[in-house]
Amino acid sequence: MFPGESVAILGQSGAGKSTLLGLLAGLDAPSSGELSLFGQPLSSLDEDGRARLRAGRVGFVFQNFQLLPTLTALENVLLPLELSPQPDAEARARDWLTRVGLGERLEHLPKQLSGGEQQRVALARAFVTGAELVFADEPTGNLDPATGERIIDALFDLNQQAGTTLVLVTHDHALARRCDRCLRLADGKLTEMTREEVSA
Amino acid sequence: MNAVAERESTSPLASAWRLLKLSARGLVRDLRAADVRALFVALALAVAASTMIGFFLDRLDRGLTRQAGQLMGGDLVLEQGRPFAPEIREALESAGMVISDQVDMVSMISHGDAFQPASLKVVDEVYPHYGTARVDIGEGVEAIPSGPPAGEVWLAPRLALLLEAEIGDAVRVGDSELRVGGLIEREPDQSAGFGSFNPRLMMNVQDLADTDLVQDGSRVEFELLAAGPPEALEQLSPLLDRLRRDGVEVRDVRRDRPGLGNALERAERYLSLAGLAAVLLAGVAVAMATRRYVDRHLDTAALMRCFGATQGELTRLFALQLLWLALAASVLGALLGLAGQAALLYLLTTFLPIELPPPGWLPLWLGVLTALAVLVGFAGPTLLRLKKVSALKVLRRELDPLPASAWLVVAVASLVFGGLLWLYSGDLVLSAGLLIGGLVMLVLLWGLGSLMLSGVLKLAGRLPRGGGNDASLPQALRLGGQQLARRRTASLGQLLAFSVTFFAMAMIALVRGDLLTTWEQQLPEDTPNYFAINIQPGERDGFEQALSGAADARSALYPMVRGRITAINGQTPRDVVPAEARGDNALRRELNLTWRESLPEGNRLVAGQWFDDLEGSTSDWYGEVAAEPEPGARPVPISMEDGLAERFGLSLGDTLTFTIGSAEVVGELVSLRNLDWDSFRPNFYVIFPPGVLERFGHSYITAFHLDEGESDTMRELVRQFPGVSLLNVDAILAQVRDLLTQVTRAVELVLAFVLLAGVSVLYAALTASRPVRAHESGLMRVFGAGNRLLSRVQGAEFAILGLASGLMGALLAELATAGIYLAWFDLAPRLHLWIWLLLPLGGALAIGVIGHLLSRDLRRQAPAASLGLLGET
């Protein structure tokens, strides 16, 4: 994968997409084989080493949002920033929340936000650190089609603005089509798909 | 520059500061969650209870020591029958003590034709170390911080009356004439010498030589009164031990502080016990709240791992966050504790005539230490789970780290609680005993709880099965019971927590009730308020008759013979008794001896046999009390107070020789008695059987109760028996009654604290079980259960839980109170039937209602929300 590229990983339910994503992001260690992240072989790092490698450089968007229920929207976005010293953290968090259209809902708790709004908070959280790489795991899986559409627009928009590398795991071909490259995961094998295959 | 590089480039100080800020911010946000609030409340209560009691006991202790110093006339008092050697003075002075000399003796004082024996107290310029004398020097009573000047004496008003002397008159003391300078209303120190029955005369040491009263063979006591800091006393310990061995009477303010009396001592123990119970309850609440806290933070931890936090950072972050919580709770708890001890003092204020020193810092540190210990002990192992969270949990929700082992949680909590017990009681054996007892109980409870849950499951299954949305009671009980019993591990945890809670609350309430009953019984309405002493044998029957018509209650008339212990097992007493008892009053002075056929009322035999039960006839005792008893004659059996025997290191079979007048009587210890010194009845260290002491000069003593209105009887007694001294103890009695009332109130205040801590456990535990219940009620709703059924099932479940916990709590409370009474309060254990009813029913009601209210909003939630289908709830 190359910097700035957007890659979709397609696969049926149970094909192991999430496992692959966990491995790619260094959340899990492979039982065999070699993986590198930012040019660093992950096998040379322990779990803490992999965490340090991720810090500030990798963003995540999850299917079930993973917002902390006791934190406001602003605080949820601040969370990854708080792990590294950044003087303008709060201003940046506000800025990103405004970019996803939640400038007026900074102090709301997740349960006071709709599903789409919650996922937009998650988007702001993924990009706020200036991540070089964002992993998105079925980002529209829990949303209705119209809301999902808007979230995807926002995701690609932000991706472009920030020049981030995006890895998108999905079973939705329409969504995959918007990426530069598509890969299919089936029977434990990852294969490059042609445009036609994706459109089919 | 990426975040890692940034982080690694900052100084350790800056990153520590960042972590501090981050954790503080995290805590503030976290306060929105019920479990954190429950943690906070529980910790604050633990600190409040321990500091309140700590502050109070600390102040009381220091106040009593100060008061004791004043009563004794110094922090250290040495007394012997000859002047003190200069080396002793030098040793005291070089240790930093200030010395005041005092001489005590009894001498005849005269004024004109009136002669009167007086108890002389000769003081120097340093006198008194503490306090002031209240003296009338002609212009009303005033406080004077010194003794009489040279050339003057101060008289007790009674002595002045008997001598018919007034201020300004001259009285003869030995060979001198001294001017009466004032009438002493109260002396600053109240060291009672052997002549304390005689009225006081105080004079200046400069006049002593001229009186020529101190001569070889005259009975004079020389005293060194020394004042100084505790460190100086500590430093002097070896010297004091040596002096004791040499037979000097050593009174050390730290050791010989007058006792608080049984009532206050028991109250002190009660307060300590209640404080510990509150801490234990708070600990249980902390443990319950922590489980929920950790469950809730597993997601946070996983996310933070995702965002690049290392295990170390996570551990530090959460540890710091909880540290803030503990500190904040400590501050609030300490403030509550301060207010609480002020309230305690206020309740006890009329009893405590002493001015207490301001609260010290020590209890505050103890309070903070308690909060931290409770947090580490009751939350530590559970918290460690957070560190073990895998980042992968964000993708796979089921990837929770294993729950902390229940045994580890209990073991760590027990160790910490045992440490606290030790810290507070200062008694390692007792703490270890309590702890081991507690663990045995816990295992017992665990087994009993398992059995109960199985029983509940079986019983619930037998209840009739209702159809559809039937919300009848049996249906609710069946479903509720099954839910409870099937969620076995969680329910067992709650069952244990609630049983311990009910147990601690019940125990503190039980002990309170029993203490109060004991106190009430101790001083019934007709407690003797008069002592009559010096009743001559010829007056005995007449006096008894005169009393029988008037007094509602009286003790027996006890004959009284004065005798001195002059040998123990044939040796000089000083060589036999433990070193610290060599200066004991009971060796230095004459004891009041009595004889009696039966065990006196209020006495309890703790060893040996009473005279009735002894083998052989009484005729073997010395028939004649002769200077040289016949060879082979058995010594006289005697009975001794157990405390004195312990001080002297005596046991059954030891012999004591008493010198009575010019004769000697040898007695052998055949029984030890425990007696209640607070009983307002005549009490005796040594009792002889009848037939031994009759031949010596003796008088009788008795105590009786007369109502205030019976002043005619009083006058008649005085007229009829002019030689008998009647002492009215109404004032002392009232003071003791007052004390008991006030101590009772203090005890109740502390009980309220324990109950509050108990409620905090209920709150924490029910908060902790919310998510599981939400999930269950969501599922039931999905399957078509109506609101009414849900509400009843939950109510039934809570009520069954409360009932079972109440039963187990009652069992535990009975066992524990029995143990504590025997070990700690010196009370006989008793069965409390009412708690077997109250605890299960009250528990069912309390937990049923509180639980039902706390889960009200769960029932209002849409099933999708409770099942987490709409994301996090």
Image (cartoon, grey):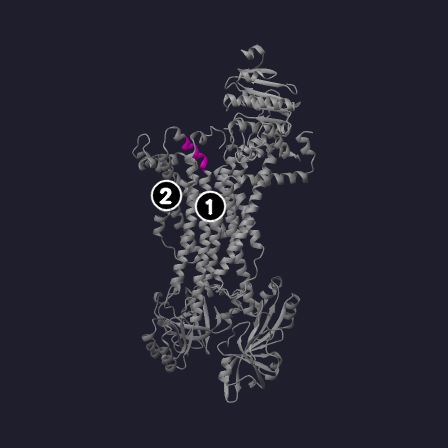
Query: Label for residue B536?
Result: none
Q: Amino acid at mark 2?
A: Leu
Q: Quadrant of the N terminus of chain B?
A: top right
Q: Is residue B301 found left or right of B671 in the rendered image? A: right
Contact (CB < 8 A) between labels 2 and 1?
A: no
Q: Which residue is mark 2?
A: B803
**Residue B367 x, y percent position in the rendering:** 55, 51
- Chain letter for mark 1: B
**Residue B494 x, y percent position in the rendering:** 43, 40
From the viewer's side, name the closer residue of B477 and B78: B477
Q: Residue at x 46, y 35 (%)?
A: B771
| Region rendered in magenta | B769-778
In the displayed structure, would residue B442 be above or below residue B863?
below
Q: Quadrant of residue A196?
A: top right
**Badge 1: few (under 14), some or many (20 or more) residues near its Cα, within 10 Å?**
many
- Chain letter for mark 2: B
Query: Label for residue B760?
Result: 1
- Asked if residue B779 lies in the magenta stretch, the reply is no
Q: Amino acid at mark 1?
A: Ser
| Element marked by disc 2 | helix
Q: Quadrant of residue B390?
A: top right
Exactly how many numbered labels are in the figure? Answer: 2
